[in-house]
Image (tube, rainbow, N blue to C red):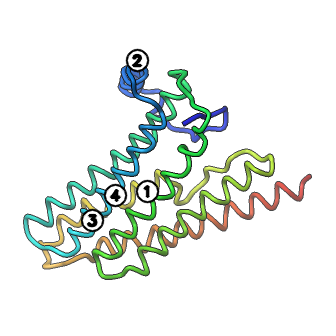
Amino acid sequence: MMETGDRRPLASRNTRWAGAIARWMAARAITPNQISQASILAAAIAGGTFYLAGQTTGLPRAGYLLLAVLFCQARLLCNLFDGMVAVEGGKGEADGPFWNEFPDRIADLMIFAGVGYGIDMPGLGWAAGAFAVLTAYVRELGRATGNPSDFSGPMAKQHRMATITAAGLASLLEPLWSGQNQILTIGLCVIAVGAALTTIRRSKTLVMRLKRR
């Protein structure tokens, strides 16, 4: 991954632990692109375990949910460290812009489709994934027209992962009321609607910027 000055604002980027891990990676034969590619694997595992969680009950379901949540966070850590190794570590690569964006789009689709198929609502999963991709499309369209990247919400990438993580953890409590997948369904609905609103908001902002010219 290669970033310029147009980066997603992340508070975690300035923490000591993130800096230490990024320096450790940069000092070894680990490239930013490899980290970006690893995020696809993390998302595939997250989507797969969300699917299995939706189709099982009891302790196996709890285990799958915990794995899914863990790998959603692993996906975010990959997104954090690929940029830090590229920029702060000075290891940016020529094809970095592709690996910066492409894995994220695949990751969103795999995670949300996995949840959707797991709760027997594949259409909802694909809708959440499609709107997630659209939020990024509008952001990149803005950059292509000479405008700054718009990372606004209400359902940017970190918000999507926070929502599905919270839904996965809260779903662990569903046996208390003999529930099954209601919280994941709600979480996926929130992501789909929130990502749609984010797409609309970013689109309106971009149109206003273009008209000011």
Disc 1/disc 2 C-alpha distance (Å): 27 Å
Q: Label 1 belongs to which residue? A: 107
Secondary element at tag 3: helix
Of marks 4 and 2, which one's residue comes earlier in the chain?
Answer: 2
Of marks 1 and 2, which one's residue comes earlier in the chain?
Answer: 2
| Most foreground residue, 87 or 6 | 87
| Three-letter residue code for mark 4 | Ala
Of marks 4 and 3, which one's residue comes earlier in the chain?
Answer: 4
Q: Where is residue 13 in the image (x, y as percent from the top left)?
A: 47, 31
Of marks 3 and 1, which one's residue comes earlier in the chain?
Answer: 3
> Of circles 3 and 1, which is in front?
1
Q: Position of residue 133 (x, y in %)?
A: 55, 63
Disc 1/disc 4 C-alpha distance (Å): 7 Å
Q: Residues within 10 Å of mark 4 (few under 14, many from 20)?
A: many
Q: Label 3 belongs to which residue? A: 50
Of marks 2 and 3, which one's residue comes earlier in the chain?
Answer: 2
Secondary element at tag 4: helix
Compared to residue 162, the image places residue 33 above or below, namely: above
Secondary element at tag 2: loop
Compared to residue 34, the image places residue 207 above or below, namely: below
Q: Label 4 belongs to which residue? A: 44
Say if mark 2 contacts mark 3, CB within 8 Å.
no
